[in-house]
Amino acid sequence: MDSDAVKKTIIKQALQATNTANARTLIENINEKCFERCVPKPGSSLSSGEQTCLTSCMEKYMAAWNEVNATYIRRIQQEMGNQSLFKQ
């Protein structure tokens, strides 16, 4: 394996680890922020309004995360000057 291949493999592994950490942070933020916002007085079950609020909040967080992640990957690809770096 040449040095470029090793470099690409290391970068790819680092990005996968970063994506995993980012996903974990996303889930933690969703749990914290959406629950605080949508369930002001926790009880034994969620009302339909709370369920709707949680669903909407989670979808917004996930859409934002997807957009940020896609932009981040595009930026790295541009800086690396190698579009095939992230292809499987």
Image: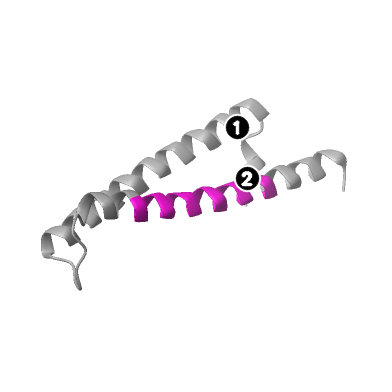
> Looking at numbered disc 2 in the image, what kind of residue is underneath it?
Leu
Q: Residue at 86% x, 40% y: name it.
A: 3
Is 22 a magenta residue?
yes
Q: Is residue 81 visible?
A: no
Judge whether 68 appears above or below 34 on screen. Answer: above
Query: Label 2, label 1: how many angstroms apart (C-alpha)?
Result: 10 Å
Residue beneath disc 1: 76
Judge whether 68 appears above or below 54 on screen. Answer: above
Residue beneath disc 2: 15
Q: Position of residue 34 (x, y in %)?
A: 29, 51
Task: Report how many numbered discs are placed on residues in the image.
Answer: 2
8 left or right, relative to 81: right
Q: Is residue 61 visible?
A: yes
Q: Which residues are magenta?
A: 13-32
CB contact under 8 Å: marks 2 and 1: yes
> Looking at numbered disc 1 in the image, what kind of residue is underneath it?
Ile
Looking at the image, tell me whether mark 2 or mark 1 is earlier in sequence order: 2
Q: Position of residue 71 (x, y in %)?
A: 47, 34
